[in-house]
Amino acid sequence: MPLLVPWELDDLSALKARPGTITVGPLRQHAGPLLYVAVVFGVAAMVVAQLLVVLALVRALRASNPPPRARTMVVLGSGGHTAEMLKLMQAMDKARYSPRVYVVAATDKMSGRKAEDFEARLQDAAAATTSDAAGAADCEPAYEVWTIPRSREVGQSYVTSVWTTLVALVYAARAVALAKPDVLLVNGPGTCIPIAFAAYVFRLFWPKPCRIFYVESIARTRKLSLSGLILYHLRMADLLFVQWDELQRKYPRTTYAGRLY
Protein backbone atom coordinates (compact mmCIF):
# COMPACT_ATOMS: atom_id res chain seq x y z
CA MET A 1 0.00 0.00 0.00
CA PRO A 2 1.60 3.32 -1.01
CA LEU A 3 2.29 5.96 1.64
CA LEU A 4 1.41 9.46 0.57
CA VAL A 5 2.23 12.75 2.35
CA PRO A 6 -0.44 15.37 1.63
CA TRP A 7 1.92 18.30 1.05
CA GLU A 8 3.64 16.25 -1.69
CA LEU A 9 0.41 16.34 -3.70
CA ASP A 10 -0.52 19.22 -5.89
CA ASP A 11 -4.19 18.66 -5.12
CA LEU A 12 -5.38 17.12 -1.84
CA SER A 13 -8.57 16.13 -3.55
CA ALA A 14 -6.52 13.57 -5.37
CA LEU A 15 -6.57 11.48 -2.23
CA LYS A 16 -10.18 10.69 -2.88
CA ALA A 17 -9.26 9.39 -6.31
CA ARG A 18 -6.60 7.05 -4.96
CA PRO A 19 -8.24 4.65 -2.53
CA GLY A 20 -6.10 2.37 -0.40
CA THR A 21 -3.54 5.04 0.52
CA ILE A 22 -2.46 6.11 4.02
CA THR A 23 -1.69 9.73 4.88
CA VAL A 24 0.48 10.87 7.83
CA GLY A 25 0.29 14.63 7.31
CA PRO A 26 -2.71 15.35 9.60
CA LEU A 27 -1.15 13.27 12.42
CA ARG A 28 2.08 15.24 12.26
CA GLN A 29 0.16 18.50 12.16
CA HIS A 30 -1.69 17.68 15.44
CA ALA A 31 1.29 16.10 17.23
CA GLY A 32 3.09 19.45 17.62
CA PRO A 33 0.33 21.32 19.53
CA LEU A 34 -0.42 18.29 21.69
CA LEU A 35 3.21 17.97 22.70
CA TYR A 36 3.38 21.70 23.48
CA VAL A 37 0.29 21.51 25.72
CA ALA A 38 1.70 18.47 27.53
CA VAL A 39 4.99 20.26 28.21
CA VAL A 40 3.23 23.40 29.49
CA PHE A 41 1.03 21.41 31.87
CA GLY A 42 4.02 19.42 33.08
CA VAL A 43 6.07 22.53 33.84
CA ALA A 44 3.10 24.17 35.55
CA ALA A 45 2.57 21.10 37.73
CA MET A 46 6.24 21.12 38.75
CA VAL A 47 6.10 24.83 39.65
CA VAL A 48 2.93 24.37 41.73
CA ALA A 49 4.47 21.40 43.53
CA GLN A 50 7.60 23.39 44.35
CA LEU A 51 5.50 26.31 45.65
CA LEU A 52 3.55 23.96 47.91
CA VAL A 53 6.80 22.56 49.30
CA VAL A 54 8.15 26.07 49.94
CA LEU A 55 4.94 27.13 51.69
CA ALA A 56 5.05 24.04 53.88
CA LEU A 57 8.65 24.79 54.84
CA VAL A 58 7.82 28.41 55.65
CA ARG A 59 4.93 27.35 57.88
CA ALA A 60 7.14 24.82 59.63
CA LEU A 61 9.85 27.42 60.23
CA ARG A 62 7.33 29.90 61.60
CA ALA A 63 5.93 27.30 63.93
CA SER A 64 9.39 26.33 65.20
CA ASN A 65 10.60 29.95 65.39
CA PRO A 66 7.80 32.13 66.81
CA PRO A 67 8.30 35.90 66.65
CA PRO A 68 10.32 37.31 69.55
CA ARG A 69 8.49 38.68 72.51
CA ALA A 70 8.24 42.42 72.97
CA ARG A 71 8.29 43.81 76.48
CA THR A 72 5.25 46.06 76.53
CA MET A 73 4.40 49.02 78.74
CA VAL A 74 0.80 50.20 78.76
CA VAL A 75 -0.35 53.46 80.34
CA LEU A 76 -3.88 53.43 81.73
CA GLY A 77 -6.00 56.33 82.92
CA SER A 78 -9.42 57.33 84.11
CA GLY A 79 -12.12 58.95 82.02
CA GLY A 80 -12.62 56.04 79.65
CA HIS A 81 -8.95 55.68 78.66
CA THR A 82 -8.56 52.38 80.50
CA ALA A 83 -11.69 50.85 78.95
CA GLU A 84 -10.57 51.80 75.43
CA MET A 85 -7.03 50.56 76.01
CA LEU A 86 -8.14 47.17 77.32
CA LYS A 87 -10.49 46.76 74.36
CA LEU A 88 -7.54 47.45 72.08
CA MET A 89 -5.36 44.95 73.91
CA GLN A 90 -8.04 42.30 73.62
CA ALA A 91 -7.26 42.07 69.91
CA MET A 92 -3.49 41.97 70.37
CA ASP A 93 -1.28 38.89 70.42
CA LYS A 94 -0.77 38.59 74.18
CA ALA A 95 1.87 35.89 73.80
CA ARG A 96 4.04 38.15 71.68
CA TYR A 97 3.48 41.40 73.60
CA SER A 98 4.69 40.00 76.88
CA PRO A 99 5.60 40.57 79.65
CA ARG A 100 3.34 43.58 80.18
CA VAL A 101 3.72 46.45 82.63
CA TYR A 102 0.65 48.56 83.31
CA VAL A 103 1.34 52.07 84.57
CA VAL A 104 -1.39 53.93 86.43
CA ALA A 105 -1.54 57.14 88.42
CA ALA A 106 -1.25 56.76 92.19
CA THR A 107 -4.64 58.39 92.73
CA ASP A 108 -6.38 56.17 90.15
CA LYS A 109 -7.92 53.34 92.17
CA MET A 110 -9.87 51.72 89.35
CA SER A 111 -7.48 51.28 86.42
CA GLY A 112 -5.13 48.94 88.27
CA ARG A 113 -8.02 46.68 89.27
CA LYS A 114 -9.35 46.61 85.72
CA ALA A 115 -5.92 45.58 84.44
CA GLU A 116 -5.75 42.78 87.01
CA ASP A 117 -9.24 41.58 86.06
CA PHE A 118 -8.28 41.68 82.38
CA GLU A 119 -5.15 39.60 82.99
CA ALA A 120 -7.07 37.17 85.21
CA ARG A 121 -9.51 36.51 82.37
CA LEU A 122 -6.60 35.91 80.01
CA GLN A 123 -5.07 33.46 82.46
CA ASP A 124 -8.34 31.59 82.93
CA ALA A 125 -8.82 31.32 79.17
CA ALA A 126 -5.28 30.02 78.69
CA ALA A 127 -5.62 27.51 81.52
CA ALA A 128 -8.90 26.21 80.09
CA THR A 129 -7.17 25.21 76.87
CA THR A 130 -4.04 23.77 78.52
CA SER A 131 -3.86 20.37 80.16
CA ASP A 132 -0.16 19.50 80.49
CA ALA A 133 2.13 20.80 83.24
CA ALA A 134 4.45 22.61 80.86
CA GLY A 135 1.54 24.48 79.34
CA ALA A 136 0.19 25.32 82.77
CA ALA A 137 3.48 26.99 83.60
CA ASP A 138 3.06 29.20 80.55
CA CYS A 139 -0.28 30.36 81.95
CA GLU A 140 1.38 32.12 84.87
CA PRO A 141 0.64 35.85 84.91
CA ALA A 142 3.07 37.77 82.71
CA TYR A 143 2.23 41.27 83.92
CA GLU A 144 2.78 43.85 86.64
CA VAL A 145 0.91 46.97 87.71
CA TRP A 146 3.07 49.97 88.64
CA THR A 147 1.98 53.33 89.98
CA ILE A 148 3.55 56.74 89.53
CA PRO A 149 2.43 60.18 90.79
CA ARG A 150 -0.07 61.92 88.57
CA SER A 151 1.48 64.82 86.67
CA ARG A 152 -1.63 66.95 86.99
CA GLU A 153 -4.88 66.39 88.82
CA VAL A 154 -8.19 67.40 87.31
CA GLY A 155 -8.74 71.09 88.03
CA GLN A 156 -5.19 71.65 89.24
CA SER A 157 -3.67 75.01 88.27
CA TYR A 158 -0.96 75.02 85.63
CA VAL A 159 1.41 76.85 88.00
CA THR A 160 1.41 74.13 90.64
CA SER A 161 1.31 71.40 88.03
CA VAL A 162 4.86 72.31 86.97
CA TRP A 163 6.27 70.81 90.17
CA THR A 164 4.02 67.75 90.14
CA THR A 165 4.93 67.12 86.52
CA LEU A 166 8.65 67.17 87.36
CA VAL A 167 8.07 64.70 90.19
CA ALA A 168 6.06 62.46 87.89
CA LEU A 169 8.83 62.64 85.30
CA VAL A 170 11.39 61.33 87.80
CA TYR A 171 9.16 58.38 88.69
CA ALA A 172 8.39 57.78 85.00
CA ALA A 173 12.08 57.72 84.12
CA ARG A 174 12.68 55.16 86.85
CA ALA A 175 9.81 52.99 85.66
CA VAL A 176 10.96 53.04 82.04
CA ALA A 177 14.56 52.32 83.04
CA LEU A 178 13.50 49.30 85.08
CA ALA A 179 11.02 47.88 82.58
CA LYS A 180 13.11 48.56 79.45
CA PRO A 181 10.03 48.24 77.22
CA ASP A 182 10.27 47.44 73.54
CA VAL A 183 6.78 48.87 72.97
CA LEU A 184 5.02 51.73 74.73
CA LEU A 185 1.27 51.91 74.17
CA VAL A 186 -0.58 55.06 75.26
CA ASN A 187 -3.94 56.63 74.48
CA GLY A 188 -4.22 60.00 76.16
CA PRO A 189 -4.19 60.17 79.98
CA GLY A 190 -1.92 62.82 81.42
CA THR A 191 0.24 60.11 82.99
CA CYS A 192 1.38 59.06 79.53
CA ILE A 193 3.31 62.28 78.84
CA PRO A 194 6.17 61.77 81.35
CA ILE A 195 6.32 58.07 80.43
CA ALA A 196 6.52 58.84 76.70
CA PHE A 197 9.11 61.55 77.29
CA ALA A 198 11.30 59.19 79.33
CA ALA A 199 11.05 56.44 76.71
CA TYR A 200 11.89 58.94 73.98
CA VAL A 201 15.00 60.21 75.81
CA PHE A 202 16.21 56.70 76.66
CA ARG A 203 16.37 55.91 72.96
CA LEU A 204 19.76 57.61 73.00
CA PHE A 205 21.14 54.95 75.33
CA TRP A 206 19.39 51.71 74.43
CA PRO A 207 20.67 49.53 71.57
CA LYS A 208 17.05 48.55 70.85
CA PRO A 209 14.93 51.70 71.14
CA CYS A 210 11.40 51.62 72.48
CA ARG A 211 8.68 52.11 69.88
CA ILE A 212 6.01 54.56 71.00
CA PHE A 213 2.44 54.13 69.73
CA TYR A 214 -0.29 56.61 70.56
CA VAL A 215 -3.94 55.78 69.90
CA GLU A 216 -6.25 58.77 70.07
CA SER A 217 -9.62 58.25 71.73
CA ILE A 218 -12.59 57.55 69.50
CA ALA A 219 -14.29 60.49 71.20
CA ARG A 220 -11.84 62.84 69.49
CA THR A 221 -13.46 63.58 66.15
CA ARG A 222 -12.19 67.06 65.22
CA LYS A 223 -9.22 67.89 67.44
CA LEU A 224 -6.47 65.92 69.15
CA SER A 225 -6.43 65.75 72.91
CA LEU A 226 -3.79 67.71 74.83
CA SER A 227 -1.64 64.59 75.14
CA GLY A 228 -2.06 63.89 71.45
CA LEU A 229 -1.11 67.45 70.52
CA ILE A 230 2.05 67.28 72.65
CA LEU A 231 3.20 64.00 71.14
CA TYR A 232 2.24 65.16 67.65
CA HIS A 233 4.10 68.47 67.69
CA LEU A 234 7.15 67.09 69.54
CA ARG A 235 7.19 64.09 67.17
CA MET A 236 7.75 61.67 70.03
CA ALA A 237 5.38 58.95 68.81
CA ASP A 238 6.50 56.55 66.09
CA LEU A 239 2.89 56.21 65.02
CA LEU A 240 -0.05 58.31 66.14
CA PHE A 241 -3.34 56.64 65.27
CA VAL A 242 -6.65 58.45 64.90
CA GLN A 243 -10.03 56.84 64.39
CA TRP A 244 -11.69 59.52 62.25
CA ASP A 245 -10.57 60.40 58.73
CA GLU A 246 -11.48 64.06 59.31
CA LEU A 247 -8.95 64.15 62.13
CA GLN A 248 -6.27 62.62 59.90
CA ARG A 249 -6.83 65.27 57.25
CA LYS A 250 -6.39 67.99 59.86
CA TYR A 251 -3.21 66.39 61.24
CA PRO A 252 -1.51 64.82 58.20
CA ARG A 253 1.28 63.11 60.16
CA THR A 254 -1.23 60.93 61.95
CA THR A 255 -2.33 57.51 60.73
CA TYR A 256 -6.00 56.79 60.11
CA ALA A 257 -6.79 53.39 61.65
CA GLY A 258 -10.57 53.32 61.41
CA ARG A 259 -12.72 52.21 64.35
CA LEU A 260 -10.58 50.13 66.69
CA TYR A 261 -13.19 49.23 69.30
Image (tube, rainbow, N blue to C red):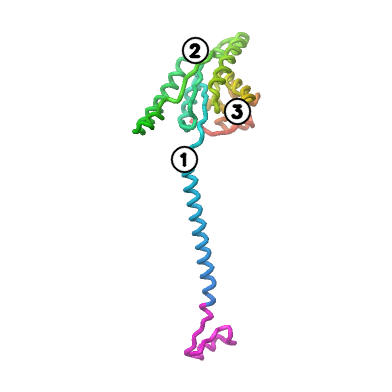
- Distance of mark 2 from mark 3, alpha carbons? 30 Å
Q: Position of residue 155 (x, y in %)?
A: 56, 11
Q: Is residue 26 left or right of residue 117?
A: right
1 or 3: tag closer to the N-terminus: 1
- The vertical placement of 104 against 13, above or below, is above
- Disc 2 secondary structure class: loop
- Residue flagged by tag 1: what amino acid is it? Ser
Circle on res. 107: 2
- Distance of mark 1 from mark 2, alpha carbons? 45 Å
- The vertical placement of 7 against 81, above or below, is below
Quadrant in which residue 141 is drawn: top left
Q: Position of residue 138 (x, y in %)?
A: 41, 30
Q: Residues within 10 Å of mark 1 (few under 14, many from 20)?
A: few
Residue 61 visible in image: yes
Q: Which residues are magenta?
A: 1-27
| Pick the front one: 236 or 16 | 236
**Marks 2 and 3 in Cβ contact (< 8 Å):** no
Residue at 64% across, 24% down: 204
Q: Residues within 10 Å of mark 2 (few under 14, many from 20)?
A: few
| Residue at the spot of label 3 | 209
Q: Position of residue 36 (x, y in %)?
A: 54, 68
- 94 inside magenta stretch: no
| Residue at the spot of label 1 | 64
Quadrant in which residue 256 is drawn: top right
- Disc 1 secondary structure class: helix
- Residue flagged by tag 3: what amino acid is it? Pro
Residue at 46% across, 44% down: 60
- Distance of mark 1 from mark 3, alpha carbons? 27 Å
- 13 inside magenta stretch: yes
- Residue flagged by tag 2: what amino acid is it? Thr
Residue 229 visible in image: no
* Of marks 1 and 2, the one in the foreground: 1
